[in-house]
Image (cartoon, rainbow, N blue to C red):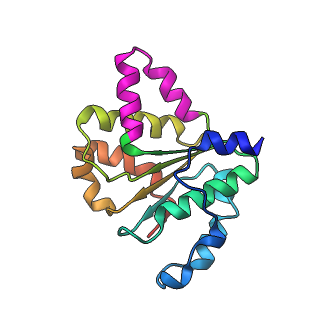
């Protein structure tokens, strides 16, 4: 079963928390990260966002949490924001948008990587909001971003959409 869960997860690589070099990241709270590995935030259906400059290990940490969730039998899916938006745009063109959105709602854990990789047009921001809002308080999302919340307004193209996307993540953020 775990082999099937690992395949479904579509991780870019398989890394665990034991492979993370905390000595290279002196400002990182190792105790807090290891606390997150207990996955209680998943039980509470809370969301998590890693905000930090490139090269800190945000994706590694997100994957490690995803690997831990899989070890507990939880369905996990990893995707970049650009892939998510691309898949949803294609599904809408094929008149299959709702079914595709449901596929992103089903996993216990959805990891959206590189949330800031590109600026979103209005429609793409709407796709992202649809996934986030439909998962809200049902199951957890882990986001990674190189940009702070203050820069998200320009990324999603509007302050209103920025507020809508940001609000479910205000409760559990790791900088």
Residue at point 33%, 48% (across, down): 163
Left or right? Give the position of 70 relative to 152: right
* Quadrant of the image containing the C terminus: bottom left
> Can you say whether 160 is above or below 56 in the image?
above
* Percent position of residue 20, x then y: 58, 73
Choose top left, top right, bottom left or bottom right for residue 30.
bottom right
> Can you say whether 175 is above or below 39 in the image?
below
Residue at point 21%, 51% (across, down): 154
Left or right? Give the position of 48 relative to 122: right
> Can you say whether 18 is above or below 138 in the image?
below
> Can you say whether 77 is above or below 169 in the image?
above
Q: Is residue 6 found inside the magenta-colored segment of the image?
A: no
Which of 154/58 is in front? 58
* Percent position of residue 137, x then y: 57, 43
Residue at point 44%, 17% (across, down): 96
Q: Looking at this rendering, what residue extends furthest in the top direction?
A: 95
Q: Is residue 96 found inside the magenta-colored segment of the image?
A: yes
Choose top left, top right, bottom left or bottom right for residue 107.
top right
**Which portion, as a residue range, is magenta?**
83-105
Residue at point 50%, 34% (across, down): 134
* Percent position of residue 53, x then y: 35, 69
Left or right? Give the position of 29 relative to 168: right
Which of 85/2 is in front? 2
Which of 144/153 is in front? 144
* Percent position of residue 32, x then y: 60, 74
């Amino acid at each position: 079963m775990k082999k099937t869960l690992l395949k479904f997860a579509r991780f870019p690589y398989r890394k665990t928390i034991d492979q993370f070099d905390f000595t290279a990241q002196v400002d990182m709270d190792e105790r807090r990260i290891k606390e997150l590995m207990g996955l209680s935030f998943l039980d509470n259906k809370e969301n998590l966002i890693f905000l930090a400059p490139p090269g800190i290990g945000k994706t590694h940490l997100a994957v490690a949490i995803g690997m831990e969730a899989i070890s507990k039998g939880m369905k996990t899916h990893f995707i970049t924001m650009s892939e998510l938006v691309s898949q949803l745009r294609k599904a809408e063109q094929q008149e299959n948008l709702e079914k595709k959105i449901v596929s992103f709602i089903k996993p216990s854990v959805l990891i959206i990587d590189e949330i800031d990789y590109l600026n979103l047009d209005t429609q793409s921001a709407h796709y992202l909001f649809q996934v986030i809002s439909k998962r809200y308080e049902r199951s957890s999302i882990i986001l990674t971003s190189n940009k702070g919340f203050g820069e998200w307004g320009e990324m999603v193209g509007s302050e209103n959409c920025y507020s809508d996307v940001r609000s479910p993540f205000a409760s559990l953020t790791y900088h």
